[in-house]
Amino acid sequence: MNYSVIIIGTVPPPIGGVTVHTLRLITGLKSLGYNYKFINLRQRTNDNKFDKKNYIYNILKFSKYRKIKVVHYQLNNIFELTLIVIICILKKCRIITTVHSFRPELFNRTKKTLFYFILRTRTEFVAPSETIKDALISEGIKQNKIKVLNTFLPPSELEINKKLPDDVMEFLNNKSNIIVANAYKIYLDEYGVDVYGLDMCIEACKAIPESNFIFCVPLIGDFDYYNQCLKNIEEYNIKDRFLIINKNISLVSLFKFADLFVRPTSTDSFGVSVAEAISMGVKAIASNVCNRAEGAIVFENRNIDSFINTIISHSKVKHNKEKHEKKDDKCKYLKEYIDIYNESYL
């Protein structure tokens, strides 16, 4: 079968901004009857290991598809992207890549060489924010190759109404001032900074006695650091007010119980979860490291006093449970992607 658009990426688990975005995009396009094919390049085996055989099979299968018009790459691996760009050049089809994260200062010589090869091709870029767009331009990508389109797509009713685990519901029982935060993975960057700000949430919980934090993170990348955070929670005597959920759960379902959402990331491209919270009527506080969704309240990055004061100023504002996006709004977001697929912006 021939497909006009091939989307290459992955879907949950684990739950993260990129995987959730990709899942909502492909399910939304399917609901509209759009002709596309999805290729999952991060499938797992039954024992939860990366499936190398399936990966090679999918790459080879992709290379054999005929009459492809557009390939949309939704991951963040420059080696993989280079291979896909070469295949698209040979097939004479368009290649679009969504730049979910862009940190060229971390590129080694090989990655820089591949990046500048891609730069010289007709690859089109989707930037989730003006921040990413400016970063791409500063590295030599022409402005006409970049389309700014944030990666937020409204959640489905199934996601919103998904049952939460018993331990979460037990924590929520008879509690107020619920503050939610999330992360894809717990780890420190090359400078020793907690990328998703678990440390800042712990300090804020200690400083604000009436607060109750739920921190959702499916993956632990640095167990030594994670254990230190658990030790801090114990020593601060906030164990009954700070719950870490180390599993995949529906964040938007949790927003039904949240009074505030915080995203103290040290680096970000847009922050889909910020837009999700706002769409659910929950006040969202986020670091000022990038352009945030309209309505977000920002604080100074890695400034704990700014973070705590901003939380205190807005923690008593309740959310509106009925605010989530309507079906017509979801179609509007999907149409923006279909428009990109239908016509090149070069």
Image (spheres, helix red, strand yellow):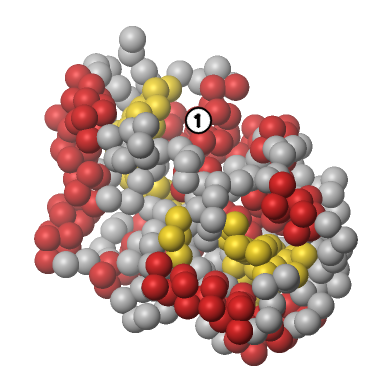
Disc 1 target residue:
26
Instruction: Determine whether the residue tagged by mark 1 lies in a helix, strand or loop.
Output: helix
**Location of residue 248 with respect to 209 vertically, above or below:** above
Asked whether 129 or 182 is in front, the reply is: 182
For this view, does 324 lie left or right of residue 127?
right
Tally the numbered discs. 1
At x 42%, y 74%, the residue is: 225
- Quadrant containing the N terminus in the rendered view: top left
**Location of residue 344 with respect to 32 vertically, above or below:** below
Asked whether 284 or 131 is in front, the reply is: 284
Indicate the position of residue 76 as horizontal and vertical percent values.
33, 51
User: Which amino acid does the dot numbered 1 rest on?
Assistant: Ile
Asked whether 168 or 134 is in front, the reply is: 168
Indicate the position of residue 141 as horizontal and vertical percent values.
29, 58
At x 59%, y 21%, the residue is: 32
Indicate the position of residue 237 as horizontal and vertical percent values.
68, 81
Q: Quadrant of residue 303?
A: bottom right
Q: Quadrant of residue 209?
A: bottom right
**Location of residue 195 with respect to 207 vertically, above or below:** above
Indicate the position of residue 5 as horizontal and vertical percent values.
38, 26
- Evaluate whether residue 267 shows in this view: no
Which residue ends up furthest to the bottom in the rendered image? 305
For this view, does 117 lie left or right of residue 11?
left
**Location of residue 197 with respect to 330 vertically, above or below:** below
- Quadrant containing the C terminus in the rendered view: top left
For this view, does 322 lie left or right of residue 23?
right
For this view, does 300 lie left or right of residue 53?
right
At x 12%, y 66%, the residue is: 109
At x 65%, y 32%, the residue is: 331
How busy is the neighbourhood of tag 1: few (under 14 within 10 Å), some, or many (20 plus)?
A: some
- Evaluate whether residue 47 shows in this view: yes
